[in-house]
């Protein structure tokens, strides 16, 4: 799905609508009005309620007693790209370069996580000549053979190294997950149009495997 910064969805800028839907995907749960207002930095809950009701009316959200949650249409909007179309040749080059990076990651003893599964899906697998983005499902696993104590010590060392290189951590949780986050970042390598999806997230996995897909690395668990 492609969107334009100039178009409107549910009577609001398309990019703002996408931002709201991405909050649900990032938190993987129902969201109350107060939570959305806080994350959007809206002081007035009534304004947040207006936005959520507009998206509900257009079929992007459903509402229950627990709060709001995205519909399949809403999930599609959350994944929508506003980038210029990607030509087929460029998309194939992006995938090839990503696989080269993954090979280097998986043989680099400094990284504490490995890429165990890579699945391309969507328009790339369908063979389309112009793509909105290149969708790739990825699963990471902890490097085999690392005892917990060793992993803990090396994790601290990776965090300290990142700090020395200018990385700022927003919370203690960010530090804990940094060894896997840095691998995600290395796979992505700031490539515009390369959209990574976590195969360990049940909803992501279900969406990917339900459609046209191709496994490039590893095996999908049955």
Image: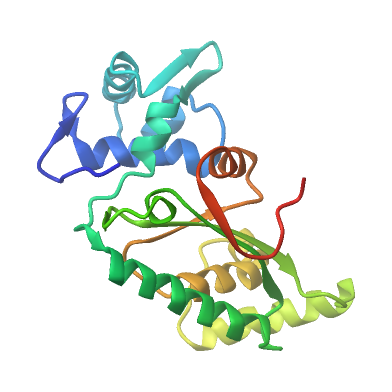
Residue 74: % across, % down: 38, 30
Q: Look at the image and tell me in which quarter the N terminus lies.
A: top left
- Give the residue drawn at x 54%, y 39%: 207
- Give the residue drawn at x 29%, y 71%: 90
Residue 96: % across, % down: 45, 76
**On screen, residue 73 above or below 99:** above
Choose top left, top right, bottom left or bottom right for residue 148.
Answer: bottom right
Q: Is residue 144 visible?
A: yes
Q: Is residue 40 visible?
A: no
**On screen, residue 193 above or below 24:** below
Residue 116: % across, % down: 69, 66
Q: Residue furthest top?
A: 65
Pick the front one: 10 or 84: 84
Q: Residue furthest left?
A: 6
Pick the front one: 110 or 92: 92
Pick the front one: 58 or 125: 125
- Give the residue drawn at x 40%, y 41%: 22
Q: Residue furthest front?
A: 127
Residue 156 horizontal side relative to residue 189, left or right: right
Pick the front one: 7 or 11: 7
Q: Look at the image and tell me in which quarter the C terminus lies.
A: top right
Coloration of the structure image: rainbow
- Give the residue drawn at x 44%, y 24%: 71
Q: How many numbered dots are placed on residues in this image?
A: 0
Residue 40: % across, % down: 34, 39
């Amino acid at each position: 799905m492609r969107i334009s910064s100039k178009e409107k969805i549910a009577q609001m800028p398309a990019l703002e609508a996408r931002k709201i839907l991405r909050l649900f995907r990032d938190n993987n749960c129902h969201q109350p009005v107060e939570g959305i207002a806080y994350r959007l930095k809206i002081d007035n809950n009534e304004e947040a309620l207006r936005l959520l009701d507009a998206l509900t009316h257009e079929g992007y959200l459903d509402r229950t007693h627990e709060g709001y949650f995205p519909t399949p249409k809403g999930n599609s909007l959350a994944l929508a790209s506003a980038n210029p179309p990607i030509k087929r040749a460029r998309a194939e080059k992006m995938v090839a370069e990503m696989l080269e990076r993954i090979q280097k990651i998986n043989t680099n003893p400094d990284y504490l996580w490995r890429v165990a599964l890579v699945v391309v899906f969507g328009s790339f697998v369908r063979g389309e000549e112009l793509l909105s983005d290149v969708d790739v499902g990825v699963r990471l696993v902890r490097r085999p053979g690392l005892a917990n104590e060793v992993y803990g010590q090396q994790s601290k060392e990776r965090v300290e190294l990142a700090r020395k290189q200018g990385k700022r951590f927003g919370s203690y949780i960010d530090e804990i997950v940094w060894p896997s986050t840095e691998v995600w970042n290395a796979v992505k390598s700031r490539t515009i149009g390369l959209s990574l999806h976590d195969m360990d997230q049940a909803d992501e996995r279900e969406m990917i495997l339900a459609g046209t897909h191709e496994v490039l690395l590893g095996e999908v668990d049955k």
